[in-house]
Amino acid sequence: MSLKMAEQIKESRQKEKEGEMAFAWFMLHGFKWEKVVDMDTEMMLGAAKKGNKFYHKDPASVMVPVLLTGSKDDPSIPGIEALYEELKSKSKKYSSFLFGKGGHMTMLTDCYNFSRAVIGYFFKKTD
């Protein structure tokens, strides 16, 4: 992750703390949601400043299928399409589904289509 991307995510999260995302983060992380979000943001910034990648292990080492989901409209993850393409180039285990609408998190902002895509992924035929 580039420093520019990490800074954009930090900026976006600061704005989101006062909007609907605050409730979503509370539902996912409980009363200490703000601390969890801040620590995660600082971890990303720290890694980007050191030139480290966001990932703790080589993405090519993934041994199980992974479905990457998100929205092209998500202001929290700038460059999501390029990010997912980079991951998919590292391993055939990665699949992605990007929605044309919705925000962050897609499972909350476009839950109907998100659930259909995920169910379809889990029930698809495998070779």
Image (tube, rainbow, N blue to C red):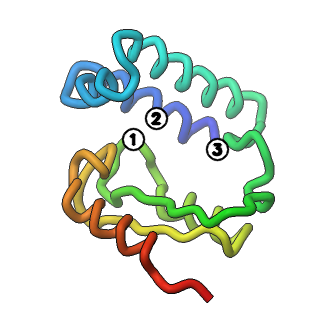
Q: Which mark is residue 18?
A: none
* Residue 15 picture location, percent across and down: 29, 25
Q: Residues within 10 Å of mark 1 (few under 14, many from 20)?
A: many
In the rendered structure, which disc, 2 or 3, sits on the residue that comes first in sequence? 3
* Residue 76 picture location, percent across and down: 39, 41
Circle 2/circle 1 CB separation < 8 Å: yes
Circle 2/circle 3 CB separation < 8 Å: no
Q: Which mark is residue 9?
A: 2
Residue matched to label 3: 1
Mark 1: which secondary structure? loop
C-alpha separation, residue under disc 2 versus residue under disc 1: 5 Å
- Viewer-nearest residue: 120 or 94: 120
- Viewer-nearest residue: 44 or 35: 35
The amino acid type of the residue labelled 3 equals: Met
Left or right placement of residue 62 versus residue 94 in this view: right
In the rendered structure, which disc, 2 or 1, sits on the residue that comes first in sequence? 2
x 51%, y 63%: residue? 67
Q: Is residue 116 above or below residue 126?
A: above
